[in-house]
């Protein structure tokens, strides 16, 4: 039962260019979406989030877009930096965060 | 300010044995969630504890149980270990009603 899907296992981008990571979900009850970043040997770190009542949220180089009709969200990183190389997880939640469902992750490689 | 801490870091157990993993939440946080992350997968929600009670549970058998103490720290217990229980177990803490979670570095459990 994959309610949150990240269909690209990996993505390679040149330093300075835009990175776009995609995520699809199936459960209409989700009302909050989050992106986490994970480096090896560390736990995931919260990056950015968006409420279902918005369609865009921006924080510095990171922007998340939400398309509710398509049940799709994306994370844009501009400009990409080598330090952004990590695994990015899309996550979705409902009911005030009682339960959070994660996607399988996308490994981002930013080449210098 | 100490973040989320977990112990032990690594653990090797034999099939059929029982294991207890421990988690101390970030200072000020009152809610603890546990996740299982298999290789190449995203974190899978096991359960969440708040006010010493299990508030929500994922699709895990009763062999997985937990506890939250008055100081908000938590334990995850797994009985009758199976080979398939080998994974990284992540603990995450948050404030009640807040979606963003802070993760610990995880406990790597290997069942032989």
Image (cartoon, coloured by chain):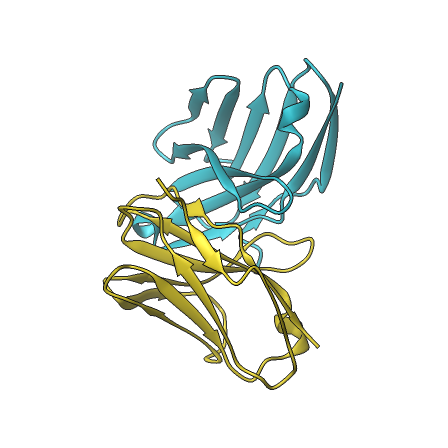
- The answer to which quarter of the image holds residue B71 is bottom left
Measured as percent of width and height from the top left, residue B39 is found at 68, 57
Tell which of B62 and B92 is nearer to you. B92
- State whether residue A29 appears in this view: no
Is residue B85 in view? yes
Residue visible at 40% across and 68% down?
B75
B96 to the left or right of B57: left
Above or below, B54 relative to B82:
above
Could you say which is closer to the camera, residue B36 or residue B91?
A: B91
Left or right of residue B107, residue B72 in this image: left
Quarter the C terminus of chain A occupies = top right
The colour of chain A is cyan
Q: Residue at x 30, y 46 (%)?
A: B27
Q: Which x, y percent locates residue B101?
A: 40, 45
Quadrant of the image containing the N terminus of chain A: bottom right
Which chain is assigned yellow?
B
Q: Is residue B81 left or right of residue B68?
A: right
Q: Position of residue B106 (x, y in %)?
A: 54, 55
- Tell me what residue is drawn at x 37 percent, y 51 percent: B93
Between A46 and A1, the residue placed more toward the observer is A46
Q: What x and y, as percent, mark residue A62? A: 51, 22
Count of number-bearing discs: 0
x 71%, y 77%: residue: B112
User: Does A111 sit above or below residue B41?
Assistant: above
Q: Is residue B63 left or right of residue A17?
A: left
């Amino acid at each position: 039962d994959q309610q949150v899907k990240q269909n690209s296992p990996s993505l390679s981008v040149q330093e300075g260019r835009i990175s776009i990571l995609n995520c699809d979900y199936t459960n209409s009850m989700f009302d909050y979406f989050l992106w986490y970043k994970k480096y090896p040997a560390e736990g995931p770190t919260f990056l950015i989030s968006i409420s279902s009542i918005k369609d865009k949220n921006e924080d510095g180089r990171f922007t998340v877009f939400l398309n509710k009709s398509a049940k799709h969200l994306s994370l844009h990183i501009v400009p990409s930096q080598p330090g952004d190389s990590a695994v990015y997880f899309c996550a979705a939640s409902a009911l005030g965060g009682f339960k959070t469902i994660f996607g399988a992750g996308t490994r981002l490689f930013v080449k210098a | 300010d100490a973040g989320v801490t977990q112990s032990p870091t690594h653990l090797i157990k034999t099939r059929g044995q029982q294991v207890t993993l421990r988690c101390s939440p970030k200072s000020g946080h009152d809610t603890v969630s546990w996740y299982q992350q298999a290789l190449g997968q995203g974190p899978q929600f096991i359960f969440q504890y708040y006010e010493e009670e299990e508030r929500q549970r994922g699709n895990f058998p009763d062999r997985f149980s937990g506890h939250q103490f008055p100081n908000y720290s938590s334990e995850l217990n797994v009985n009758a270990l199976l080979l398939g229980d080998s994974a990284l177990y992540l603990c995450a803490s948050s404030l009640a009603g807040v979606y963003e979670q802070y993760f610990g570095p995880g406990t790597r459990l290997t069942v032989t």
